[in-house]
Amino acid sequence: MQNKIKNKKGFGLIEIIIYIAIFTAISILVINSFIVILSSFNTTNMNRKLLESSSTVMERVSREIRKAKNIDIANSTLGSTPGVLQLNTTDGAGNNATIKFIVASQTLNLYRNNNLIGNLLNQDVSITNLVFRRIQTANGEAVKVEMTLRYSSGHNTKSENFYDTIVLRGGY
């Protein structure tokens, strides 16, 4: 009888099935965790790129509007989509300069004296709506900016609206 007990060193069929079931359950939990982590990373990455682009655009537009002497109404399409904003300003040497923000092919291009400076948006981010609205009071003027950005990469797409109101220099 003792020889039979000593020789039994293998696993039984039921034990193997139980081990495989436990391994399968743990594997499913780990794979599901990875899927959730990757999904969260993609969502965070989309939000980061949208906020980064909006911050860059709004900061540049705000800086240029604040420095501007006035808005060139004849060459701006205030209150329309896609937006074009032309500002009359001065450069570092005090010479007159023209700054334009123009939406073209879902990019936001910056022009200085009719020379393209570049696209203000990050890669995979496009602009779907840009409206400049002029606000005039007895004491000054301001520009309200309404912008919609869209992030697209593969099957991930997200749109977000951004707003800002900027007072021209001397308008307060």
Image (tube, rainbow, N blue to C red):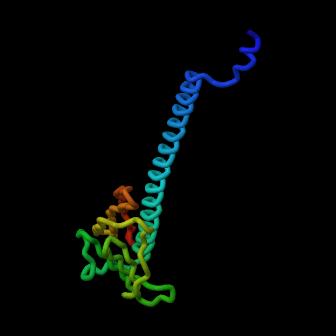
- The quadrant in which the C terminus is found is bottom left
Residue 70 image point, x, y percent: 35, 78
Q: Above or below — where is 172 with respect to 87?
A: above
Q: Residue at x 44, y 71 (%)?
A: 60
**Quadrant of residue 76 within the rendered picture:** bottom left
Q: Residue furthest top?
A: 1
Above-or-below relation of 42 to 98: above
The one of 10 and 64 positioned closer to us in this rendering: 10
44 lies left or right of 113: right
Q: Is 51 in front, or is 80?
A: 51
Q: Is residue 139 left or right of residue 92?
A: left
Q: How many marks?
A: 0
Where residue 48 sits: x, y (%)?
A: 47, 57
Q: Quadrant of residue 104?
A: bottom left
Q: Quadrant of the N terminus?
A: top right
Residue at image coords 54%, 26%: 17
Is 19 located above or below residue 49 in the figure? above
Q: Is residue 69 left or right of residue 83?
A: right
Task: Give residue 11's position: percent from left, percent from top.
Answer: 63, 24
The residue shown at (28%, 67%) is 133
Displayed quadrant of residue 50 = bottom left
**Residue 22 versus residue 150 in the image, above or below:** above
From the viewer's perspective, tell me whether residue 151 is left or right of residue 75.
right
Confirm whether residue 136 shows in the render: no
Does residue 95 appear in this view? Answer: yes
Q: Position of residue 82 (x, y in %)?
A: 26, 71
Nearer the observer, 24 or 144: 24
